[in-house]
Amino acid sequence: MEKDFEVGLNMINLSGKEAIVTGAGSGIGRGICSVLALAGANVLVTDISGKGAEDTLKHCGYGDKFRARQMDVTNENSIDEIISEHIKDRKKIDILVNNAGIIGSEGWSNREIPNSQDWTEVYEVNVRGVVKVSERVSKEFQNQKRGKIINIASIAARQGSPDSPHYSTSKAAVVSWTQSHALQMAAYNVNVNAVCPGLIWTPIWESIARKRSQFGGSLETKGLEGKKLFDQTVKAWVPLQREQTPEDIGNMVAFLASDLAENITGQSINVDGGRFTN
Ligand SMILES: NC(=O)c1ccc[n+]([C@@H]2O[C@H](COP(=O)([O-])OP(=O)(O)OC[C@H]3O[C@@H](n4cnc5c(N)ncnc54)[C@H](O)[C@@H]3O)[C@@H](O)[C@H]2O)c1
């Protein structure tokens, strides 16, 4: 068994590939960058926070495999500048990972019901941001006649949520966009897939925990705080009884970005310890 696992790992080979990851200055994006580099890819680490992107470089320590740039996925000029600069320097893009996402606007955790600013900002980043970066990079992919796009959706797309309907709706839109974009890009030999992460302790979850400890949620979590509330949620919701990690998501991204997944497109794959089975 141990041997099969080693062979499987060796088969994901991204040597010489050029990857761009959005929202990679923190949490899951950082884990994705790390795994892609480990599999051999050169990675452009982008984030709305230039400091966050630089910190990922320091944190992961992959030397000249990583470059960092500030890029706001809601801003077409920012996207065009960074993608054009990348093409000039590196001549191609092989892999785009749309990871940037938010759970609400300023003060979201202190509101029981999301307000219209929450709906607007979450839609702009989580949905329009994915579409904007995808459309810009797809121009390059159409010329190259190959490419891989992996969108980070969420298990929130699988079931409505009483306290964050704006977020669940945005992630369901990412799943739907993934299907449409896969059909648009199939003629250009481009694969478009999504990963739906389960429960991962990052700043997004810290903010969910702040909200649920004040107002409760679909679980009896009122009164619990921070990581304790998160751990209780994992216990109640995850059949495998463990939280997921940024590297778990990175592993699925690396697989979808590799030649092993060349006949997979338009899919949204849960990495959630069995929370949702369809
Ligand atoms: N943590 C979880 O349990 C979980 C579960 C399912 C899905 N997700 C999704 O995974 C992705 C990463 O989330 P995370 O948990 O690592 O959160 P995070 O807050 O640690 O990371 C999100 C990153 O996106 C960046 N960002 C925000 N707005 C941006 C913009 N306009 N342009 C570019 N970058 C921007 C932030 O600066 C931050 O570095 C998100 O799409 C999130 O919805 C997270």
Image (cartoon, grey):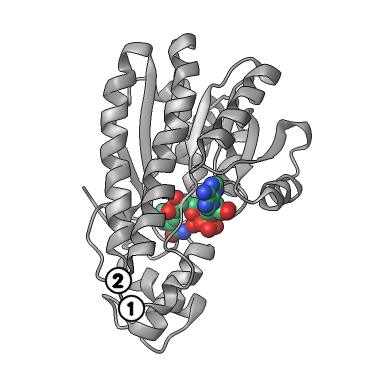
In what element is the residue under mark 1?
A: loop
At a point 37% along the width and 72% down the height, the residue shown is: 233
Identify the disc placed on residue 112. 1
Task: Residue under label 2, please give it.
Answer: 163
Residue 173, compared with residue 230, is above or below; it is above
Question: Observer-nearest residue: 239 or 167?
Answer: 167
Residue 41 appears at what percent x and percent y?
Answer: 62, 28
- Disc 2 crowd rating (10 Å Cα; few below 14, some 14-19, many 20+) is many
At a point 47% along the width and 33% down the height, the residue shown is: 133
- Note whether ligand 1 is within 8 Å of mark 2: no
Residue type of the residue flagged with mark 2:
Asp
Residue 245 appears at what percent x and percent y?
Answer: 51, 55
Q: Is residue 108 left or right of residue 160?
A: right
CB-based contact (under 8 Å), mark 2 and mark 1: yes
Question: Observer-nearest residue: 112 or 271?
Answer: 112
Q: Of the residues under marks 2 and 1, which one precedes in the sequence?
A: 1
On the question of residue 237 being in view, the answer is yes
Q: Is residue 29 left or right of residue 51?
A: left
Q: Nearer the viewer, mark 2 or mark 1?
A: 1
Quarter-of-image position of residue 109 = bottom left
Residue type of the residue flagged with mark 1:
Glu
